[in-house]
């Protein structure tokens, strides 16, 4: 992949993930409100625990998305591939987006599936653009 395209891909990926992070927190806030107002419980669980669990899931998911966005942002700004932990984090984020994309088709619709697929594609494209050996190509002398 051309060196020129790597930076914009990583920066767009970071921007999308940074925008998605508060969105997932807001979505979980709405779900927590529904659970609270309707006093929902699952197999006799206390509704207050359900509300707390929904809030915790939303906040942790938002923080993890922000962390993934930071990894992509650092890769784009430094124009270097992420370290082993950063790549593992991005791979995990891609897997989650793939699974959630498959689930959203039935629950929400094709628009949500398309969004999740675009984000999945951006994450995978970032990982491929900064694949193994890209740093060595940068350090190699230009052919004469």
Image (tube, rainbow, N blue to C red):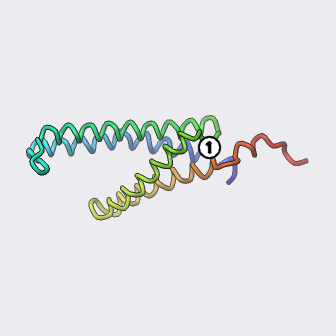
Name the residue at 50% across, 41% down. 14
Name the residue at 66% across, 49% down. 132
Q: Please tell me in which quadrant of the rendered image residue 32 appears.
A: top left
State the SS at label 1. Answer: helix
Task: Provide residue 67's location: percent of width, then percent of height.
Answer: 45, 36
Task: Provide residue 63's location: percent of width, then percent of height.
Answer: 38, 36
Q: Which residue corresponds to mark 1?
A: 7
Name the residue at 40% across, 60% down. 114
User: Residue 132 versus residue 80: which sits nearer the camera?
Assistant: 132
Task: Provide residue 55's location: percent of width, then percent of height.
Answer: 24, 38
- Establish if 37 lies above or below 110: above
Name the residue at 75% across, 42% down. 138
Location of the N terminus (image quadrant): bottom right
User: Residue 90 versus residue 143: which sits nearer the camera?
Assistant: 90
Q: Please tell me in which quadrant of the rendered image residue 30 appears.
A: top left
User: Residue 49 versus residue 109: which sits nearer the camera?
Assistant: 49
User: Going by the image, does 141 lie left or right of 104?
Assistant: right
User: Residue 27 versus residue 87: which sits nearer the camera?
Assistant: 87
User: Going by the image, does 35 lie left or right of 143?
Assistant: left
């Amino acid at each position: 992949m051309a060196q020129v395209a790597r930076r914009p891909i990583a920066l767009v990926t970071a921007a999308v993930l940074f925008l998605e992070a508060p969105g997932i927190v807001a979505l979980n806030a709405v779900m927590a409100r529904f659970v609270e107002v309707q006093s929902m419980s699952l197999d006799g669980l206390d509704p207050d625990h359900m509300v707390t669990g929904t809030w915790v899931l939303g906040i942790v998911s938002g923080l993890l998305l922000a962390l993934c966005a930071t990894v992509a942002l650092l890769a784009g700004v430094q124009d270097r591939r992420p370290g082993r932990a950063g790549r593992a984090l991005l791979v995990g984020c891609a897997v989650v987006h793939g699974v959630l994309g498959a689930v959203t088709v039935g629950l929400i619709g094709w628009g949500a599936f398309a969004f999740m697929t675009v984000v999945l594609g951006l994450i995978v494209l970032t990982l491929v653009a900064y694949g193994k050996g890209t740093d060595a190509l940068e350090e190699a002398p230009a052919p004469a």
